[in-house]
Amino acid sequence: MHRSWLRTKVNENKTKVAQRVTERAKSMVPTQRGAETDSCMVCGRTMRQTAVVRGEGRVCSPTCARKWAEGLKD
């Protein structure tokens, strides 16, 4: 076998593997849900989406939680 043929085969396999890795990485990126965004109910800051808690009723920090709790007392 000639070295150039082996190099060609190695390069072909490298591109195949690279394409598979790229496809897998793209499939692992979380997708955005429609127009639904999670935001803090006190300050309105956009927050990371979770599978456990969604929608309204979330606060982004202990400070916002305190402000929200103080609003309930009044």
Image: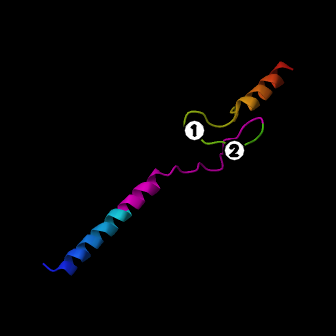
Residue 67 on image: x %, y %: 80, 28
Residue that badge 2 annotates: 46
Left-right relation of 23 to 32: left
Residue 35 on image: x %, y %: 66, 50
The residue type indicated by label 2 comes to Thr
Q: Main secondary structure of the magenta part?
A: loop
- Spatial CA span between label 1 and label 2: 12 Å
Magenta highlight range: 20-42
Res 7 → quadrant: bottom left
Residue 74 on image: x %, y %: 87, 20
Residue 28 on image: x %, y %: 45, 51
Circle 2: element type:
loop
Q: Observer-nearest residue: 33 or 9?
A: 9
Query: Residue farthest to the right?
Result: 74
In magenta segment, residue 22: yes
Q: Which mark is drawn over residue 50? A: 1
Above-or-below relation of 73 to 68: above
Q: Observer-nearest residue: 44 or 9?
A: 9
